[in-house]
Image: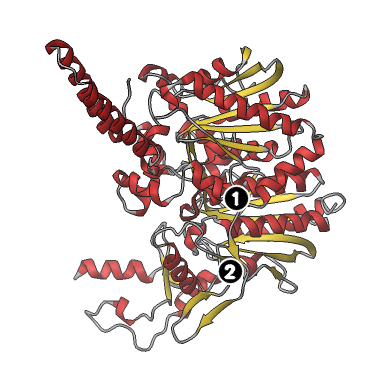
């Protein structure tokens, strides 16, 4: 197996030990089958223990894993007849966003994803999956196209955030993101968004205003990257792991806060262990939600999407009491 | 010393002479600073010119020598823009809680509240400008760098919904460092919530004027601030998505001095107008009047 994470090292060690023991036994003609069986039992216990206790910080690393399936990997495994379409018709074609028309179980849909590169060379072409305004505008163009032809929209979110560069600012990065939020809320077709890796800030949200927002088990989603938060809070970007714990960025946290509708389970050890199985799970879940939404007309879809986001936010409306002596504000429930 | 003499001369030169108090002037050799009560004088953050605070107030907190528009808090802004009578505040008691139990957030909130005397980073309500009824939201950079958490998002959304229901124009004065990271994902979702409310408002035919004040960045810039039918900025106001330092680190280049300023954005087609503070009220009045037939819809 490739791409082990540091927290998986005990498993790697143990696998090595078992293999060594087996080999030793074979070479010397000694029967170690009892010991091997015992070790294998211990191994599966350890495996259970490790994989059922993946911390937020470990998930952050899994979500960013360089061999984790990208949007194009999933598109290839989930859809048929994918035809990629290019360009925003305004400035250029941003390779950090891919999109086009495809079939899902035989039904035409529009699918759009944020696309990291697999190696450094590709990452440079794709800006590490961080879109410029033209990327967001391309995605909006494809969404409006889908709306015109009555196709449901499926988006895959996987970005550290919108590209933070001067050219992006000059061409209206803020406007491009804001426009997507504005327009996506009014789309007359079903919109299903899946956070497949890292959902970083406004750049992620600009493609995640859906009737359903789903997350892969080890994906993360937050307002600011844990690295960014750490450098602001503690003036130390290396404390990202600490920030990851505090920021509630995992799928479990977001389901609890009702920001997402469902967690899509990943193969044991992460989606990169078994692309086919991961894709199958995404496909089944998306298809189920799509069927649920299929019965709704345009007005109902818009209303459903509006209410989904309308209800998010936690605050108190109780009277704020000012304690004059201590000059301290206290929130009274 | 000659040096000292010249320095003193430079500082005194900017104070209107008729307002100088003659009695009790600084004794020789003493630093004049010690004689000046706290808050009497103000220094321009941009050009360093020192002037009477009262003079500055009269000049709407715009530096008379370089034209720098100093930051205003929400209360000052409301007093400057709205007609003096008839402002009714909405949701004045809505306060942040600490939904994520984020380290240090609760105490930071308390500290911001006692520092500013405000409950949160935005004031919303109804009022009028030049006799034209409007729903307004005015952000406050003094409070938690104007960051948007659940409360800011909810108050603005409610104000927009109110404007939609009552058929009134919507006016938002933005200033913000971005999303409030102590509320993480909940803050991010406020961008979608406010934008969706504005989409409905727009569909109903409402006029939304967005006024950018210094600075407007991050999640606020990338949501409601950029969605105005008309977008106006104060001169010099910084308006952009990513922070200057982050961009410089990404592209490994120094950025030009005027990067992300109102003038820069106007040049790049991201704004309709750059309006001096002195003309803001009259410009808004004119725009509201031009939309009277349909903008109040």
Pointer 2: what residue?
B76
Whether residue A90 can be seen here: no
Q: Is residue A111 above or below residue B160?
A: above
The extreme right residue here reads: B293
Given the image, what chain letter belongs to the residue carrying mark 2?
Answer: B
Structural crowding at the residue carrying mark 1, measured as other residues with C-alpha within 10 Å and reported as few (<14), some (14–19) or many (≥20)? many
Which residue appears at 62% of the width and 61% of the height? B138
* Residue closest to the eye, A292 or A250: A292
Give the percent coordinates (x, y) of residue B233: 60, 50
Crowding around mark 2 (Cα neighbors within 10 Å: few <14, some 14 to 19, many 20+) is few
- At a point 44% along the width and 44% down the height, the residue shown is B243
* Residue B195 % position (x, y): 66, 46
x and y, in percent, of residue A130 in the image? 47, 30
Q: Is residue B71 above or below residue A212?
A: below
> How far apart are labels 2 and 1 at the CA level?
26 Å
Tell me the mark number nearer the camera, choosing from 2 and 1: 1
Of the 4 image quadrants, the one containing the N terminus of chain B is bottom left
The mark that comes first in sequence, 2 or 1, is 2
- Secondary-structure class at tag 1: helix
The residue that appears at 72% across and 71% down in the rendered structure is: B88
Q: Which residue bears the numbered disc 1?
A: B190
Describe residue A102's horizontal placement relative to residue A73 as left or right: right
């Amino acid at each position: 197996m490739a791409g082990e994470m540091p927290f998986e090292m005990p498993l790697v060690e143990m696998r090595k030990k078992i293999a060594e023991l087996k080999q030793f036994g074979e070479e010397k003609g000694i029967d170690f089958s009892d010991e091997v069986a015992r070790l294998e039992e211990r191994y599966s216990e350890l495996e259970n223990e490790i994989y059922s206790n993946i911390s937020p910080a470990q998930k952050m690393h899994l979500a960013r894993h360089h061999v984790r399936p990208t949007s194009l990997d999933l598109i290839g495994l989930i859809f048929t007849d994918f035809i990629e379409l290019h360009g925003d018709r305004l400035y250029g074609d941003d390779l950090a966003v891919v999109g086009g028309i495809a079939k899902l179980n035989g039904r035409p849909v529009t699918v759009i994803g944020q696309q990291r590169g697999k190696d450094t060379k590709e990452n440079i072409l794709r800006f590490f999956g961080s879109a410029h305004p033209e990327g967001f505008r391309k995605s909006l163009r494809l969404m409006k196209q889908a709306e015109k032809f009555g196709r449901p929209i499926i988006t895959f979110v996987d970005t550290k955030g919108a590209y933070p560069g001067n050219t992006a600012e000059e061409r209206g990065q803020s406007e491009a993101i804001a426009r997507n939020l504005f327009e996506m809320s009014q789309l007359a077709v079903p919109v299903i968004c899946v956070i497949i890796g890292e959902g970083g800030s406004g750049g992620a949200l600009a493609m995640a205003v859906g009737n359903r927002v789903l997350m892969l088990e080890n994906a993360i989603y937050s307002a600011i990257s844990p690295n960014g938060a750490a450098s602001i809070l503690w003036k130390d970007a290396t404390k990202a792991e600490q920030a990851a714990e505090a920021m509630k960025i995992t799928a479990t946290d977001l389901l609890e806060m009702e920001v997402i509708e469902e967690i899509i389970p990943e193969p044991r050890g992460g989606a990169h262990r078994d692309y086919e199985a991961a894709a199958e799970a995404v496909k089944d879940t998306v298809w189920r939600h799509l069927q649920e939404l299929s019965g709704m007309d345009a007005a109902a879809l818009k209303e459903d999407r509006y209410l989904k986001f309308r209800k998010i936010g936690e605050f108190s409306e109780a009277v704020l009491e000012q304690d004059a002596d201590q000059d301290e504000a206290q929130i009274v429930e | 010393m000659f040096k000292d003499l010249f320095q003193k001369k430079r500082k005194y030169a900017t104070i209107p002479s008729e307002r100088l108090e003659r009695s009790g002037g600084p004794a020789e050799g003493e630093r004049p600073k010690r004689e000046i009560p706290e808050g009497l004088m103000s220094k321009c953050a941009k050009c360093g010119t020192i002037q009477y605070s009262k003079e500055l107030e009269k000049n709407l907190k715009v530096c008379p020598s370089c034209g720098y528009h100093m930051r205003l808090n929400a209360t000052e802004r409301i007093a400057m823009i709205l007609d003096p009578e008839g402002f009714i505040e909405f949701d004045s008691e809505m306060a942040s809680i600490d939904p994520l139990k984020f380290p240090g957030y609760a105490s930071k909130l308390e500290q911001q509240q006692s520092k500013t005397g405000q409950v949160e980073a935005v004031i919303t309500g109804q009022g009028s400008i030049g006799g034209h009824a409007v729903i307004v939201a005015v952000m406050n950079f003094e409070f938690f760098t104007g960051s948007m958490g659940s409360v800011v998002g909810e108050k603005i959304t409610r104000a927009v919904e109110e404007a939609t229901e009552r058929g009134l124009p919507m006016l938002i004065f933005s200033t913000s460092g971005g999303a409030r990271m102590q509320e993480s994902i909940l803050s991010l979702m406020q961008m979608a919530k406010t934008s969706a409310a504005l989409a409905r408002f727009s569909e109903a035919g409402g006029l939304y004027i967005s006024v950018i004040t210094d600075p407007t960045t991050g999640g606020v810039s990338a949501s409601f601030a950029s969605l105005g039918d008309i977008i106006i900025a104060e001169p010099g106001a910084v308006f952009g998505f990513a922070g200057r330092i982050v961009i410089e680190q990404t592209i490994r280049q120094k950025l030009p001095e005027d990067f992300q300023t109102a003038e820069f954005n106007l040049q790049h087609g991201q704004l309709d107008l750059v309006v001096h503070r002195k003309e803001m009220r009259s410009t808004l009045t004119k725009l509201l009047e031009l939309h009277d037939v349909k903008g109040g819809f």
